[in-house]
């Protein structure tokens, strides 16, 4: 179990607290694909558009990104002409703004 408290995290295994502060590397990997701000998601999307392998090494596969905390995806893929990744598993029920999200993303052709 991993509990986030602002910039810190409390790690628990069962009922025992293991530590507080910066998570160990094997726990941090789980956090790399959780996006809580539009800016952080935009950074990851731009990185993915430039170099898929490098972005996946940093953020994990795009299909696994947790975007459930994002409410504004306006212009997210705007003008990314070659972007065509599978984002069908993204939880977007909380998104309230998708204005021009795929504007100019002419290659995007996912179901």
Image (cartoon, rainbow, N blue to C red):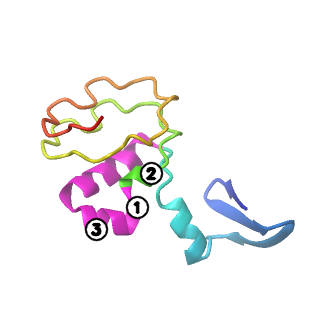
Q: Which residue is mark 3?
A: 54
Question: What separation in Å lies between label 3 and label 2 (alpha carbons)?
Answer: 15 Å
Q: Which residue is mark 2?
A: 65
| First to last magenta residue range | 37-61
Residue 54 figure quarter: bottom left
Mark 3 or mark 2: whose residue is earlier in sequence: 3
Question: What separation in Å lies between label 1 and label 2 (alpha carbons)?
Answer: 8 Å
Q: Are marks 1 and 2 in contact (CB under 8 Å)?
A: yes
Question: What separation in Å lies between label 3 and label 1 (alpha carbons)?
Answer: 9 Å
Rendered residue at 14%/32% (across/down): 104
The crowd level at tag 2 (other Cα within 10 Å; few <14, some 14-19, many 20+) is many
Rendered residue at 44%/43% (across/down): 89
Q: Which mark is residue 16?
A: none
Quarter that holds the N terminus: bottom right
**Residue 23 position in % (x across, y down):** 62, 71
Q: Main secondary structure of the magenta part?
A: helix
């Amino acid at each position: 179990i991993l509990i986030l408290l602002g910039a810190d995290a409390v790690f628990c295994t069962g009922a025992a607290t293991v530590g507080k502060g910066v998570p160990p590397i094997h726990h941090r990997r789980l956090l790399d694909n959780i996006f809580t701000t539009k800016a952080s998601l935009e950074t990851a999307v731009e990185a993915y558009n430039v170099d898929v392998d490098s972005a996946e090494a940093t953020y994990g596969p795009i299909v696994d990104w947790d975007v459930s905390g994002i409410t504004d995806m306006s212009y997210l893929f705007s003008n990314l002409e070659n972007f065509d990744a599978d984002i069908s598993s993204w939880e977007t029920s909380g998104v309230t703004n998708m204005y021009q999200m795929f504007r100019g993303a002419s290659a995007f052709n996912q179901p």
